Image: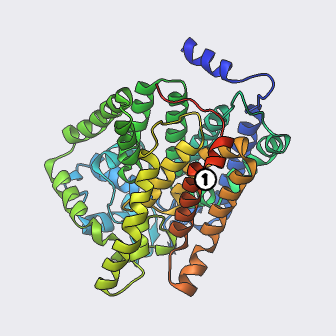
Amino acid sequence: MSHFRKSVKDSMTSSSTLSTRPWVWALSLALGGLIAVLLLASPSHRWQPDLVTEAPYGNDFLQEWIGGHLILTGEANKLYDSAVFQTSQHDPARTGFQWSKATYFPPVYPPPHYWMATLLAWIPYRFAAILWLFLLAGAMSIGFWISAKYVVRFQEVRLEPFAKKILERWSWIAIVLFPSSVFCFVMEQKGPFWLLIFAATWGLLRQKRDGWAGVVFGLLSIKPTLFFLLPIVMLRYRRWRFVAGAAFTVAILWGGAFAALPIEVWSGFAEKLRLSGSYAGIQGYHLDWSCNLMSLSYVAQAPNVVALLKWLLVVPLSLYALLLVTGPERLRIDHPSTPWNILIATFLLSPHAYYYDLVVMLMPILWYVAMDTKRGLLYFLSLVAAVVLAPLVLETLGIPLIPIVLAGIMIEKGLSQWVPAAVAREPNAGRIA
C-alpha cells in the first residue's frame, strides 16, 4: 500500500500537478443534483404503485434485480425462460408497482451477472433502485478521480494553460452533460462501473502492477461484450501477469456462479448465446444506439446485401481495428492513444454495444485533452454529436451514425500514428517491459 501511495505521489510533479479533489467534489455534487432531479421529476424514478406506467420504475435496473431475485427465491432454473422473466418483472407482488406489458427486458446477461445482482436483490425493489443510483454516482466520481490522477504527463511535454483551464474548470461539467453519462443515470445503466474498472486497470498498468490490473479487469467478464479485446492484446504482448490476474478473477466469478446455480441456468444461457446472432431483430432493438460495425450491415433487408456489406465494409474495418491494437511493436501504456485505440476497437468489434457504454471513453479523452487539447476536444465533440444526431440520421438516411463516427476516428487516429511527421511530434512514451 505504501508503494502505491509513493508511486502516485511521484507521478505528480509540482510544476504540472492538477488538483483532482475539487473535480471530485464538483462532479459528486453535480451527480447528486442530477439524481435528485431524476427522483423528483422523472416519471421512471417516481414511485407510483397505483398507476400503470409506460416505463418501469428504475428503468433498466429492473433486469438486474429480477434476475437476482429469481435466484434468491429458488427460481434460478427459470432464469433464462423468457416467459417467466417477462412475467416476473410485471408482477406487482414481486416489484411493488405496475408498468406496461407491451415491453419487457429479455434475460441477455451471463449467469455471473445475475449472480452478483443478488447482492441488491434482497432489498425491496423501490429502495434497491435508489441505492443503485447512488452507487452509479459513486462509481462515476471514483472512476473520474482515478482518470484525473493519472492524466498523462511526459518529461518532454508541459500541460498547456488552455488544457489546464479546461481540465480544472470545465471537465466535470462535460462529464455530467456527456449524453452517455446522462443516459446511464436516466436508464440506470452500468456504464459508470465499466469506467471505474477501465480507469483502475489502466492506473495499475501505469504503475507496472500488471497482476493486480488483471485482477481488477477480470471483473468486467460479467460484461463479455466489453471484456474480450484487452486480454487478447495482452496475450499478443506477452503480459502474462495481467492474463493470469484476469484469469484468476474470471475463475472466481464464473466458477462461483457455476457452483451456486443449477445446470438449467447454463443450458438456458447456452441457448441464448446460440440465438445471439439474431439479437438485432428482436422487438425494442435500437439501431440508432448501436456502436458496433455489425450494425452497419443491419440496415439492409436483403440477405445477399447484408452479406455483401459484411465482406466489403465490416470485415476490412474489423481487420483494421485489430491491426491498430496488435500491430505496433510496442504497447505504450503511458500514451493515451493506447487505451483510446483499444476502447474504440472494442466497441467496433463487439457483437453488441450501445452508446450508453461510451462513458468509458471519458478516461482516454481526459488524457488526450491534457496532451493534445485540440484533438482531445475534437474527439469528445465528435462523440457527443454522433450520439445526439444518431436518431435523426437513422430516421432520414436509414444508417447507424455512431459506428461510422467511431470508425472515422479510428482511421484518422491510425493514420496520424503512421505518418512520420505525426509520430515525430509524439512524446517518447515508455513500453511495457
- Amino acid marked by disc 1: Ser
Q: Which residue is mark 1?
A: 416
Say whether residue 411 is visible: yes
For the point 70% across and 58% down, which residue is it? 378
In front: 178, or 371? 371
Left or right of residue 169, residue 331 in this image: left
Note whether 20 is above or below 167 in the view shown. above
Classify mark 1: helix, strand or loop: helix
For the point 45% across and 60% down, which residue is it? 348
In the displayed orientation, state which residue is furthest to the top: 2
Q: Crowding at label 1, few (<14), some or many (≥20) Cα neighbours within 10 Å? A: few
Expressed as whole percent of the image width and height from the top left, the position of residue 9 reads 67, 19
Q: How is the image coloured?
A: rainbow
In the displayed orientation, state which residue is furthest to the front: 420
For the point 60% across and 80% down, which residue is it? 392
Say whether residue 188 is visible: no
Note whether 206 is above or below 225 in the view shown. above
For the point 46% across and 57% down, which residue is it? 347
Expressed as whole percent of the image width and height from the top left, the position of residue 421 reads 66, 48
Expressed as whole percent of the image width and height from the top left, the position of residue 359 reads 57, 53
Left or right of residue 257, residue 402 in this image: right
In front: 11, or 224? 11
Expressed as whole percent of the image width and height from the top left, the position of residue 224 reads 35, 50
In front: 58, or 183? 183
Classify the position of the N terminus by image quarter.
top right
Note whether 264 is above or below 118 in the view shown. below
